[in-house]
Image (cartoon, grey):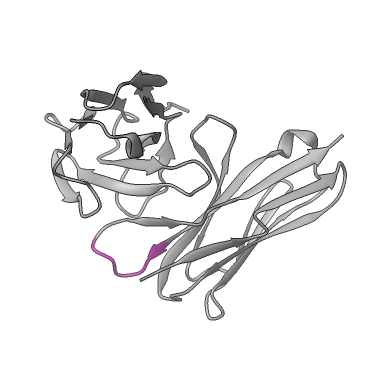
């Protein structure tokens, strides 16, 4: 059974710092991996999706990498801003599954201090 | 970009009562998902529809939960009777197909007293 773990559970950094969020998964046979952002009391906003054949994806100040063989992904946020404060979730879709079931981690709560 | 619409945003009800949530996916999205997110955890899939058909409801507590998508567009998730442990955020998502990115609504926050 696929399990997704995110470390750290919470992170507080001063504005302007670069930071890395970690995600690990137990079964490397995944179809893709997706990073989401969730603001308090809100739904999820998709940030980046990495297909299993890809190594990384970039969008603005965000860069996500995927090492399928080791079961790891990282989300790199450059020059953090207070507006980046949110919970960041990663989710994997198991390859070959009958349905597009996303398995989520428990998230990293990020606070960027002005 | 169009959004997934959910209502109500908040629902407070007593144990043993019935409660219903509504979701309108992005136009043209054939796949619709209902998730439950307990505070401090990641979302967990309850049910997935492809058009009007259920393709995965393995995690849906079928003794009290039901879901339908009669015309393959909007969907309703119902709980009867509600229990204290049902307090959570209920999220709806949609995608063009099973392999496409999922887009989420803002959810319904359910509190059972």
Q: Position of residue A7 (x, y in %)?
A: 64, 61
Residue A94 shown in magenta: yes
Judge from the rendering whether residue B113 lies leftward or rightward of residue A50; answer left or right.
left
| Residue A11 percent across, percent down from the top left | 74, 51
| Quadrant of res A3 | bottom left
Give above or below for B58 relative to A46.
below
- Give residue B95's quadrant in the image: top left
Q: How many marks?
A: 0
| Region in magenta | A93-98
Please name the residue shown 30% across and 27% down the image.
Answer: B23
Q: Is residue B37 above or below residue B73?
A: below
Q: Residue at x 72, y 39 (%)?
A: A84
Image quarter (top left, top right, bottom left or bottom right) of the C terminus of chain B: top left
Judged by its main secondary structure, the magenta piece is loop
Residue A95: x percent and y percent?
35, 69
Q: Nearer the viewer, residue A10 or A68?
A: A10
Vertical arrangement, residue A19 with respect to residue B90, above or below = below
Residue at coordinates 75% horizontally, 41% vertically from top-left?
A111
């Amino acid at each position: 059974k696929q399990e997704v773990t995110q470390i750290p559970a919470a992170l507080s950094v001063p504005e302007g710092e670069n930071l890395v969020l970690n995600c690990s998964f137990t079964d490397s046979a995944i179809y893709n991996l997706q990073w989401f952002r969730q603001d308090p009391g809100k739904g999820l906003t998709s940030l980046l999706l990495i297909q299993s054949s890809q190594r990384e994806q970039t969008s603005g100040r965000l860069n996500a990498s995927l090492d399928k063989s080791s079961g790891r992904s990282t989300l790199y946020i450059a020059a953090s801003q207070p507006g980046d404060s949110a919970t960041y979730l990663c989710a994997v879709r198991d390859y070959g599954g009958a349905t597009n079931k996303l398995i989520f981690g428990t998230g990293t709560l990020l606070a960027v201090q002005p | 970009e169009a959004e997934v619409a959910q209502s109500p945003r908040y629902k407070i009800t007593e144990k043993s009562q019935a409660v219903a949530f509504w979701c309108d996916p992005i136009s043209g999205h054939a796949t619709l998902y209902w998730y439950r997110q307990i505070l401090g955890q990641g979302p967990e899939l309850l049910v997935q529809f492809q058009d009007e058909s259920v393709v995965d409801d393995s995690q849906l507590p079928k003794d009290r939960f039901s879901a339908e998508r009669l015309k393959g567009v909007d969907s309703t998730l119902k709980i009867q009777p509600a229990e204290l442990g049902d307090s959570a955020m209920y999220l709806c998502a949609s995608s063009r197909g099973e392999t496409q990115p999922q887009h989420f609504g803002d959810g319904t926050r359910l509190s059972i007293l």
